[in-house]
Image (tube, rainbow, N blue to C red):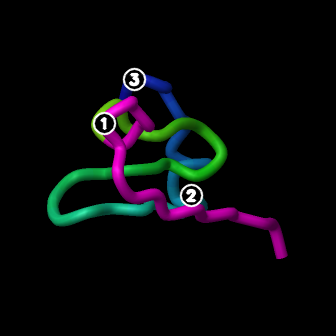
Amino acid sequence: MDEKVSRHKRDKLALVSSGDKIVWVTGYRISDFAKLTPQTKKVLCLRCERP
């Protein structure tokens, strides 16, 4: 919602979620709760490529 992505683009976006929280909207941003901090202990690296 904050990014004001048009409905046309929104229908084609991939989302990464954890439980009921959106972690990453591919091509736009990651959630604040998923960002790395000095307290981060584990990291999962994902990459999204266009076909």
Q: How far apart in space, not on screen, are marks 2 and 3 (Cα)? A: 15 Å
Secondary structure at numbered mark 1? loop
Write down the quadrant of residue 38 in the picture.
top left
Q: Which mark is residue 13?
A: 2
Relative placement, left or right, of 31 versus 18 is: right
Please tell me whether residue 2 is drawn above or below residue 27 in the rendered image. Answer: above
Relative placement, left or right, of 34 versus 45 is: left
The mark that comes first in sequence, 2 or 1, is 2
Please name the predominant secondary structure of the magenta segment in the image.
loop
Q: Which mark is residue 2?
A: 3
Q: Position of residue 9 (x, y in %)?
A: 61, 48
Q: Mark 3: which amino acid? A: Asp
Q: Tell me the residue that label 1 is attached to.
A: 39
Which-is-in-front pick, marks 2 and 1? 1
Q: How far apart in space, not on screen, are marks 2 and 1 (Cα)? A: 30 Å
The mark that comes first in sequence, 2 or 3, is 3
**Start and end of the magenta stretch?**
34-51
Q: Would you call the spot at circle 1 few (<14 residues within 10 Å), some (14-19), or many (20 or more)?
A: few
Q: How far apart in space, not on screen, are marks 1 and 3 (Cα)? A: 27 Å
Secondary structure at numbered mark 2? loop
Secondary structure at numbered mark 3? loop
